[in-house]
């Protein structure tokens, strides 16, 4: 069986280094924040070409605290993609604001920037693009609109570790950039983890205080914060993995290039990569009107696939309160019926990629 993603193989490749890092933290006797988290934050900020990074408990908290640092709350609107993982929307509703969905460009899967301006109202506080599947969204038109209307931009970069937009790493194009280190992400911990990066010292400082009970000095609480601290054991693991990230991204690229050339003429719709985008292939997504047949055929040929995502947020029961008509967001609705994510990851073997390609070509 070719698994969709083999996290055990990723660990085994770095086992010696990771085990040593974990034991260094256990031996240190320091288990909350401290030197390991400080060191990871500095290394992650440098990697992302950003001035500041704050380590957090997970990617959803990164989004929530980014919005709180910008004083987003009840009565405010935040523009989000209609096709994203539900966490993007949950961050907005968690702070009491309203998610305003904008449809994607179906060729790139990223937010269609030409549809953002009509969605802006007096209540709009933030535009929240997602770099979906590891491919950067078109940031310049988004930043221009935000500047013109005096609103902020927060990026959901949970799938985009190391991706570049017009040659510059994702990490500080906008006000705050939000990261997840969930195990399956391109930079993944051995449990939950998250962070923000930013060039804005004021926002980094607010988020740093918010993550630790609203406290700068122990037992002195400036604001009603939360407990959302990056675990030092996870920080130590992430420091090891960060040293291998570019190499692992290169391996993803090789696999994506192989898929791109071998699946050209199969009738499957492949993701369009704009000239200014340097994606990191968190997911390799194809589209087929016969997606379910294709998925079953691959399963019968021992190939594991997943669907990202089968139900768009506006059609989830969780958002029935918004009373959004499924017909109102047809692009997201239709993409959900057609997308299929093929196996991709640094540990996927070239012969396995060939097997996947042959299995697809058998059918198409
Ligand atoms: C994974 C993910 C998140 C949430 O990250 P967690 O660490 O699981 O909370 C948010 N947005 C997107 C697009 C994601 O893929």
Image (cartoon, rainbow, N blue to C red):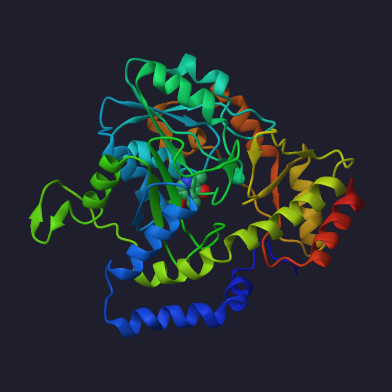
Occupied quadrant, residue 233: bottom left
Q: Is residue 152 left or right of residue 345?
A: left
Examine the rendered structure and indicate whether residue 235 appears above or below residue 92.
below
Occupied quadrant, residue 290: top right
- Between 195 and 43, which is closer to the camera in this rendering? 43
Percent across and percent down for residue 221 are 10, 52
- Between 81 and 126, which is closer to the camera in this rendering? 126
Quadrant of image for the C terminus: top right
- Between 128 and 94, which is closer to the camera in this rendering? 128
- Between 249 and 261, which is closer to the camera in this rendering? 249
Occupied quadrant, residue 248: bottom right
Q: Residue at x 16, y 47 (%)?
A: 224
Quadrant of image for the N terminus: bottom right
| Residue 325 in sight from this viewpoint | no
Q: Residue at x 80, y 46 (%)?
A: 260
Percent across and percent down for residue 331 are 62, 27
Percent across and percent down for residue 39 are 37, 65
Q: Is residue 233 left or right of residue 253?
A: left
Q: Is residue 10 left or right of residue 74?
A: right
Examine the rendered structure and indicate whether residue 213 appears above or below residue 347.
above
Q: Residue at x 61, y 32 (%)?
A: 333
How many marks are shown on the rendered structure? 0
Q: Residue at x 27, y 81 (%)?
A: 29
Percent across and percent down for residue 348 are 72, 65
| Residue 7 in sight from this viewpoint | yes
Q: Is residue 316 left or right of residue 55?
A: right
């Amino acid at each position: 069986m070719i698994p969709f993603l083999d996290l055990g193989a990723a660990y085994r490749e770095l086992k010696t280094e990771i085990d040593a890092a974990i034991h260094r933290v256990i031996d240190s006797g320091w288990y909350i924040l401290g030197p390991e988290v400080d060191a990871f934050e500095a290394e992650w900020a440098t990697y992302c070409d950003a001035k500041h990074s704050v380590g957090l408990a997970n990617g959803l908290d990164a989004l929530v605290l980014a919005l709180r640092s910008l004083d987003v709350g009840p009565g405010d609107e935040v523009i989000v993609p209609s096709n994203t993982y539900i966490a993007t929307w949950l961050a907005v509703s968690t702070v009491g604001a309203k998610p305003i969905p904008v449809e994607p460009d179906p060729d790139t899967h990223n937010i269609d920037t030409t549809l953002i301006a009509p969605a802006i109202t007096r209540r709009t506080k933030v535009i929240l693009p997602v770099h979906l599947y590891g491919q950067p969204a078109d940031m310049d038109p988004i930043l221009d609109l935000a500047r013109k209307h005096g609103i902020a931009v927060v990026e959901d970069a949970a799938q985009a570790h190391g991706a570049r937009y017009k040659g510059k790493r994702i990490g500080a194009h906008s006000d705050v950039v939000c990261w997840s280190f969930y195990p399956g992400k391109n930079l993944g911990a051995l449990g939950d983890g998250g962070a923000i990066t930013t060039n804005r010292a004021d926002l980094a400082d607010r988020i740093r205080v918010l993550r630790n009970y609203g406290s700068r000095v122990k037992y002195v609480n400036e604001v009603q914060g939360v407990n959302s601290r990056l675990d030092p054991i996870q920080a130590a693991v992430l420091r090891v993995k960060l040293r291998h990230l570019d190499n692992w991204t290169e391996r993803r690229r090789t696999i994506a290039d192989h898929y791109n050339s071998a699946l050209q003429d199969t009738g499957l719709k492949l993701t369009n990569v704009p000239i200014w985008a340097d994606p990191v292939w968190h997911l390799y997504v194809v589209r087929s009107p016969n997606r379910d047949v294709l998925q079953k055929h691959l399963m019968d040929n021992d190939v594991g696939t997943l669907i990202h995502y089968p139900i768009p947020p506006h059609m989830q029961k969780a958002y029935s309160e918004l009373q959004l008509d499924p017909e109102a967001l047809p692009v997201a609705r239709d993409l959900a019926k057609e997308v299929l994510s093929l196996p991709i990851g640094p540990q996927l073997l070239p012969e396995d990629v060939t097997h996947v390609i042959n299995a697809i070509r058998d059918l198409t």
